[in-house]
Amino acid sequence: MASTGTPPDGPERPDRSDRSGGSGAGRPRSSDAGRVLGVWKNWLTPVVLSALVALGLSLLYMGNILTPQKHLNHMPIALVDSDAGPPLPGQARPLGAEIADQVVAGSPPGEIDWRRVSREEAQRLLASGKVYGALVVPEDFSRAVAALTTADAPARPRIQVLTNPGMGGLGSGIASQINQTAAQKASQGIGEQLSAVAGTETARTFLADPVEVAVEVGHPIGERTGAGLGAFYYTLLLLLAGFMTANIVHAGLDVSMGFADAEIGPFHLREPTLRISRTQVLLAKMGMTAGVSLVSASLVMLAATVLLDMDAPHAGQLWLYSYCAVTTVGLGVLAIIAAFGNVGQLVAMFVFIAFDLPASGATVPLSASPGFYRFLGVFEPMRQMVDAVRSILYFDARAGAGLVRGWLMLPLGVVVALVFGFGMTRYYDRRGLRFEPGHRS
């Protein structure tokens, strides 16, 4: 937004493109572009800003994706011991209890948050998005292991690895890999214990790897969900819709109020400058953004759920949340632009896109991200939006699956945008930095 109502070129001056004053004054010359490019100061701002943006985006995105396994921090995984025994000869407890203890003890401190729960509780945690997966020792595990040393054709005991695709492919995959590794270590340990008492040759063939690790889906989601990535891309669309709506409204009203020129192809338009305070300008832009967001959010949902047939079991709540999210992002963008001027568009891009995407936990879980991204995830809006959209799409709109937090963060974001935006414009107005002719900031 221009900071003054005075036309950017100031008072009418002779055309500098032809200093001779002859009949060719005002006509473009082939050397004009060369003269512009030949001034090193004209290169300075584009080069510096472009370099900083390119470097910053590269570090932000690539720094969060390359080695997520090395940044594990209390990743929640359910651990279920349903083994009912009886204990093997010489043992005081069923094997399931020993395996559970070994799994917890064998994890590096602070990496995995093993939640030792019942089978029913594990299913509830999976269905509410509280865990990325589960490792389950079934009820007959000790009995099946004991049969390895006596039966001629024993059935392999099983340990279940349950995945949670609704939490995203990478997060669910990391948890599955951790669970499978833990189950294979348990299998090798059991084989070493039983090798000395194996009664048949057939049994000995099983003891090198006696336990079958069965990978199953713990909480199924629909087929038209992008294997769990649908929530991420839908949320990204809401974020971009809010960002673009705010910028379009900002540019359009600046033209209408005479603060900026409109150029469409070869046509150029300059409206008379409106005498209006910065606070009233921001109020008008925010009001229009709230209205236009109704269209933007509705079309995002129409494209995703109707034209592309994305699974959306709670369509009404998804639409309402979509509209509120787009509006909140739009108001935040306008507040930043009002505070920082034209450079505010770049600042808003970093706040709502550059920092937001890697800190959302949608592609790389925050529990597998460096600490800097976990810090950003506390307040960056996309993190809250992803959890709410996941809850609506994959976890039956359960409040505990992130829906409550996702809703609460929207009015908080609106309040922050209003206080910051109008606080800055009122400050500028009191300083006399108005959008009026003769007032230049």
Image (cartoon, rainbow, N blue to C red):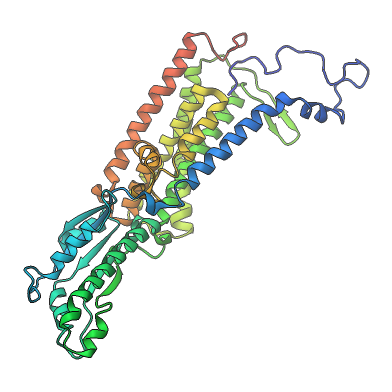
Residue at horizontal 27 percent and vertical 78 percent from the top? 208
Q: Nearer the viewer, residue 321 or 240?
A: 240
Q: Quadrant of the N terminus?
A: top right
Residue 10 image position (x, y, % from top left): 70, 14
Residue 355 image position (x, y, % from top left): 45, 39
Position of residue 302 in the picture relative to residue 85 (left or right): right
Q: Nearer the viewer, residue 348 or 433?
A: 348
Position of residue 328 in the picture relative to residue 349 (left or right): left
Direction right: furthest residue: 22
Question: Residue 328 falls in which quadrant of the image?
Answer: top left
Q: Which of 310 and 342 is in front in this view?
A: 342
Residue 418, above or below 92: above
Position of residue 433 in the picture relative to residue 182 (left or right): right
So how many labels did they put on this image?
0
Residue at horizontal 22 percent and vertical 76 percent from the top? 191
Q: In which quarter of the image is the C terminus?
A: top right
Regarding residue 292, the answer to whether it shows in the image is yes
Q: Which of 21 and 37 is in front in this view?
A: 37
Residue 113, above or below 178: above
Regarding residue 123, the answer to whether it shows in the image is no
Residue at horizontal 58 percent and vertical 30 percent from the top? 251
Residue 227 image position (x, y, % from top left): 40, 61
Residue 79 image position (x, y, % from top left): 21, 60
